[in-house]
Amino acid sequence: MRHRCVKPVGNRERRRRRQEAGSELEFKTHVCCCVSVFCCCRRVCSAKMDEALVRTRIPQDLEKVLGVESQTNAKAAAFTKAFLKKSIQQNSRHDLDGMLSHKAVILGYSRPKKDKVKRNSKRAKGLNARQKRAMKVFQIKPEHQRYELFLPLHELWKQYIIDLCNGLKPTSSPQFVQQKLLKADFHGAIITVVRSKCPSYVGTTGILVQEFKHVFKIITKEDKLKVIPKRNSVFAVEVNGFVSHIYGSRFEQRASERSAKKFKVRGTIDL
Amino acid sequence: MRRADKDDKPTVYQRVVLKNASPHHYMKIHLVLQDASTRLSAVELKQFIITGLKSLYGEVGAALNFDLLKYDEDTLTALLRVYSRGLVKLWSSLTLLGSYQNQACAFRVLQVSPFLLSLTGNSRDLQLD
Amino acid sequence: MVRLKSRYLLCEVIVSDRSRLLLLDDRAIASAVKAAVARIHGDYGAALCSIRFSVKYLNAHTGIVFLRFPKRCYKLLWSALPFITSVETHRQKIPCFLNCLHVGGTIRTCQKFLVQYNTRQLHQMLPKCKNEEEKRQVHKAILSCSLTRGNKDTIEDEPESEEDEEE
Amino acid sequence: MNMSVDLDQTPRSLLVCDWSSFLDDKNRVSSQVEQLHFNYKVSVLLPECSSAPAHLDSVLNSFSSFYLIRNLPIHELLDKQFLETAVYQGSVYGLSYRTRIDEDNCVALMPNGRLSLSLDKDSYQLLGVEGKPSRFSNRTNSRYVISIDLTDNSMAPGGRGYLRLLTGLMSRLHLTTDFLLSHHPGGGASLQPLLSRYDWSEHRPELHSHALTHLSCPELQSCDPHSFLEWLGAVDADISCENSSISFLSSLVCPEPKTTLSRVLRVSICGLLLPQDVHRLIQEIRCYLEQPQLESWLSLTVHGFVDSPVSWGGREHGVLRGGENFYTLLMFHDHTYHLHLATGAHDTCPP
């Protein structure tokens, strides 16, 4: 952390100075290098188990066999120094450049966002709209578009509403029933369009098989699947003699979201 | 304003279409008074309408020419004739006339037409009982 | 750009006794115009006059008045101006009438006209001068007529010089 | 000078003037008369005549009677028996009574078998039959006009359109109005099956005649149409034209040049009048005019119903201020005639 904060400034500083006075910088780098070389040597030596062993003189007999002449201690030390200096100097210089460029990379570095990754993983669990469409998940096959197939659903729905409204006796108040119906699920209800801005929708009746945000899909007695926009239409739902009118324009939510939604008490009844 | 399509022999067949050419407009109005027993003469009625015009449109409005063609004192129903350009002024001042001699009153405009003839044949008067 | 269009009426207040001109102020003129409009055009006119009517500028020395009316009804309001016969100010009734000199869409055009008008007046005055001193003064005044000087200066200066000559 | 703002504008009005002769093959009087289906009032002005001639009187008295049904559900007009006895045979004239076209739902059944409904927005949305926005409603459509041809195949009893309209009128929009009915040529006999089920009454057109004396009359051949109509209206409404131009109350005067007629007879007849009867009357008047007389002209004015949803032909009609749709036929001795047709605002041009 500290590095990230401090070094870029120093780096920039240094670059600026290099531009100002190239020679001075050169010199400084050299000094720097020397220091680092020394450090290196020392580290290398200590890493090697025994320095003394290296520096021991080669025995006389071996000297003869190999045809080399052992140097004096001081001479050898000088050589090693020179050799190391020569060979390592290049590397250290390289490193320095590398470090400089590396630091520049640090400048623009940003922390990977963890939550994004999380969301991605979450989304990947389901299908997106296009995939759903391609796979026709929510489409009812033509051979299944039959009114009598959905009659049991309607029976279930009736039972559900009666349970929801505590038996739905004729004595129960319409306000109470409407309050319950407002939050109820309508899949399986028999709905009728009683008013619409578009006259051709008026009078259409059938079992509600699917509800989307903006449309109802109903299946009519003639086994036709009809898609009816909620907007600009009024629907009537009949349960045990209670007829409720639903203003579609005020009902434009998904069935699941509706339960949590608060409805406005007053509003225009105009389409 | 005018469109005329004439045949080759204008003496034989001629058709003229007049659009917005009527110089006058005619109004059938009915005065409703708070106290139904109050009677107005024709002169009083015209004077009353002129005061209405004067309060809404000032002296220029009071100078607006209109005729009280017919007035029935029993039913307080009158026929007015006004130049087409003054129709809106007259009508609006009738609407805003609210009191006659400190009693509330209102003018009901029954029918307005650019033809006097059409005021004599209003099918809304048909009574079948 | 959309803007509210107005018409500026450049009028001069004509009084018999010029010294009483100095008694005039904006509010007196405005109320006189409003009263005249209400009398001539009734409630309808008074309502139109209450929207964007204002007295933009009044020079009490020369009696020059700028009136602003909304463009859509300026003719109606204008028609009431000849009916102003007196302006009441400081509990005094000043008999006067308004003479409309120019109608413009902006104050600037009205000002240009006013400068031109006053120059013309000075030119007419030149032959009538009696002595050299007067002639010299009128010459000076004509030469000083231009719009390049400060806006208000021109308006105020020239009429004053004109006035000097008259006296 | 246009001082005020939009204060001198008046809604549109149309006056069509035709000058022609009955002897001309191209004259269209009979079609123009027949296209105005719902006539409320016919008034005839007979100059130099103190009592109506016998044959004119007989024609006026033989105007067919009409029927008023109270609280008729409109779906009864789609009744199969009614369609077969009345609509398909002859021509039936039906119009809702005491409904105002600017506030209520109006229904008209035209002789060509078209049913025209002028409905307010809420009723239209309930009914569920395709219609058109009315020319009389402004930007927000508050009135719709539905026009249905009952003689069409789809509107035959049992057909798709028929069932749709029937269920709409029976179950959703319970449209009930007082209804005026008349039938040509069957009269009451063709309507009897429908009438017998409801509260109905038969009405004769009301006949009024009024004699006027010393009437000043303009020169008709050269008179400006508007002045002529004004004069005729003044005569019809009993308005005196004897004013001086300086009188306070009224300055209405008879247009110059003028003559004075010693006697004038004004005959008017009110009710639901059939165009066929009007046509018969015109023929009779032409015969009457051929006799040598003092004054050789005669005028006939026919007023349409103000609240009818249709005027000439099947074109839409409405009330903006006056709802005028009338025509005046001024006939002369030499078989020439002047025909003035007038409609109010937003109506289409008469034929």
Image (cartoon, grey):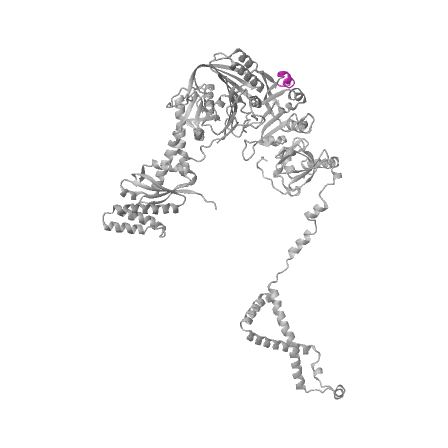
Q: Quadrant of the C terminus of chain A?
A: top right
Q: Main secondary structure of the magenta part?
A: helix
Q: In the image, which residues are magenta?
A: D186-198
Q: Is residue D205 above or below residue A31?
A: above
Q: Position of residue D231 (x, y in %)?
A: 45, 21
Displayed quadrant of residue A24: bottom right
User: Which residue is at the front of the view, C134 or B7?
Assistant: B7
Asked whether residue B102 is in view, the answer is: no
Displayed quadrant of residue A92: bottom right
Q: Is residue A174 magenta?
A: no
Asked whether residue D326 is in view, the answer is: yes
Q: Quadrant of the N terminus of chain A?
A: bottom right
Q: Position of residue D147 (x, y in %)?
A: 61, 28
User: Which residue is at the front of the view, D90 or A214?
Assistant: D90
Residue lying farthest to the top in this orientation: D54
User: Which residue is at the front of the view, D181 or A18?
Assistant: D181
Q: Position of residue B70 (x, y in %)?
A: 43, 21
The residue that appears at 42% across and 27% down in the rendered structure is: B99
Q: Is residue B39 above or below residue D161?
A: above
Q: How many marks?
A: 0
Residue lying farthest to the left in this orientation: C131
Q: Position of residue D279 (x, y in %)?
A: 56, 18
Would residue A255 appear left or right of A62 to someone viewing this image?
left
Q: Is residue D197 magenta?
A: yes
The residue that appears at 29% across and 52% down in the rendered structure is: C140
